[in-house]
């Protein structure tokens, strides 16, 4: 087996420089996606760039504009009752559903997004929160809306040398009601067969849906913002007729594949069922 260089840079400039300079170098965060891929030979990195020594990359900070979550913040911190992330139910529920306590202690939010699995729990939840990601690279720092970050299974807009540094959730989302539902084959320690993340802003007087975000996990090449489903709900009263119409729309706009966890047809039906359940729960909030 060939040797692997292991770097622990003290700042982002150095980390970025190594990733640019060394061919087949990869960021390692918690390693819960990366290491299994190395063990099975799917990935054969020549160098690993460990971000754990870079200051402030694990911070979770609530400001008047919104919540800033460092890329190295782990999932256990997001699931913690004391975390500022607790104000966003959909994110808390997604974090609590991810893996096991051991996995959550290692797994990071940055890793969950950059691994770009269609089933990534935090990715799906964050799409329903209008999240943005901050990317640092040789040309400086840029911000990208999360719904433009994913390119395909395992692929993102990140270029060689670029590092995801922070995730931003706008504070206006704090007053939206949100929920996360995930269907798995096993009760725990399993990735989603289908997941639905939903956020709703009510008009308190009329109980009309002023605005809505729906995101679907594991039913498309990337976590999917379900815009046609949102259209079927926006401006309406969330009664059984609206919920049924929206859930049918979700079933139509998802693009699942068949794999070991379920057939495409099963996933489409599940999408309808979970969307119905999530919207019924939100209608009671
Ligand atoms: C037993 C088990 C159960 C799991 N269950 C679930 C589950 O229920 N739901 C779920 O969504 N996932 C699950 N996972 C997958 C995994 O735990 C998560 O995706 C996790 O969030 C990955 O984070 P990490 O820090 O371990 O990433 P790593 O494995 O360190 O990195 C993943 C990828 O992202 C890149 N990367 C990491 N951070 C950055 C960054 N800041 N900038 C640029 N690139 C970066 C790495 O180079 C690598 O390609 C499970 C994994 C295991 C082993």
Image (cartoon, rainbow, N blue to C red):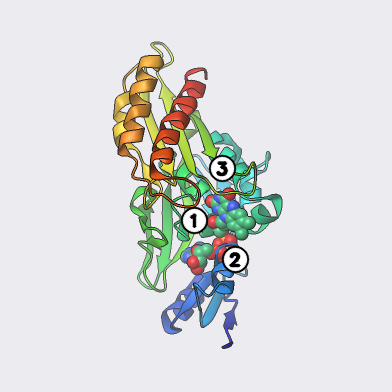
- Mark 2 and mark 1 lie on one chain; the one further toward the N terminus is 2
Q: Residue at x 70, y 50 (%)?
A: 101
Q: Residue at x 55, y 63 (%)?
A: 33
Label disc, if present, on residue 184 of the rendered structure: 3
Closest to the observer, 168 or 253: 253
Provide residue 269's location: percent of width, then percent of height: 41, 34
Up/down of 31 relative to 83, above or below: below
- Mark 3 and mark 1 lie on one chain; the one further toward the N terminus is 1
Q: Residue at x 54, y 75 (%)?
A: 49
Give the secondary structure at mark 1: strand
Kindly report the distance in space between the C-alpha atoms of the residues bearing marks 2 and 1: 18 Å
Up/down of 272 relative to 117, above or below: above
Kindly report the distance in space between the C-alpha atoms of the residues bearing marks 2 and 3: 23 Å
Q: Can you name the residue that lies furthest to the bottom here?
A: 2
- Ligand 1 within 8 angstroms of badge 3 C-beta: yes
- State which image quarter holds ligand 1: bottom right
Up/down of 160 relative to 86, above or below: below
Give the secondary structure at mark 3: loop
Provide residue 219's location: percent of width, then percent of height: 40, 45
Closest to the observer, 176 or 240: 240
Q: Residue at x 44, y 15 (%)?
A: 204
Closer to viewer: mark 2 or mark 1 = 2
Residue at numbered disc 2:
31
Residue at numbered disc 1:
166
Closer to viewer: mark 3 or mark 1 = 3
Q: Is residue 60 left or right of residue 203?
A: right
């Amino acid at each position: 087996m060939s040797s692997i260089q292991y770097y622990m840079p003290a700042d982002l400039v150095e980390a970025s420089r190594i990733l640019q300079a060394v061919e087949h170098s990869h960021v390692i965060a918690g390693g819960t996606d990366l290491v299994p891929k190395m063990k099975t030979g799917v990935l054969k990195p020549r160098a690993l760039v460990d971000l754990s020594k870079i200051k402030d990359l694990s911070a979770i900070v609530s400001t008047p504009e919104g919540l800033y979550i460092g890329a190295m913040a782990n999932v256990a911190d997001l699931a913690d009752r004391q975390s500022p992330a607790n104000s966003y139910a959909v994110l808390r529920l997604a974090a609590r559903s991810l893996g096991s306590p051991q996995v959550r202690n290692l797994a990071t939010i940055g890793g969950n997004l950059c691994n770009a699995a269609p089933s990534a729990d935090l990715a799906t939840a964050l799409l329903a929160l209008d999240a943005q990601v901050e990317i640092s690279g040789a040309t400086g720092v840029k911000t990208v809306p999360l719904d433009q970050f994913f390119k395909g299974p395992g692929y993102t807009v990140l270029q060689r040398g670029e590092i995801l540094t922070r995730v931003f959730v706008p504070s206006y989302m704090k007053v939206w009601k949100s929920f996360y539902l995930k269907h798995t084959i096993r009760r725990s320690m399993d990735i989603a067969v289908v997941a639905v993340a939903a956020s709703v802003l009510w008009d308190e007087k009329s109980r009309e849906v002023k605005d809505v975000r729906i995101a679907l996990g594991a039913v498309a090449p990337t976590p999917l913002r379900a815009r046609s489903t949102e259209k079927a709900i926006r401006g309406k009263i969330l009664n059984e007729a609206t919920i049924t119409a929206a859930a049918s729309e979700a079933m139509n706009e998802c693009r699942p594949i068949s794999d070991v966890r379920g057939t495409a047809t099963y996933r489409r039906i599940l999408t309808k069922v979970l969307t119905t359940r999530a919207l019924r729960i939100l209608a009671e909030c």
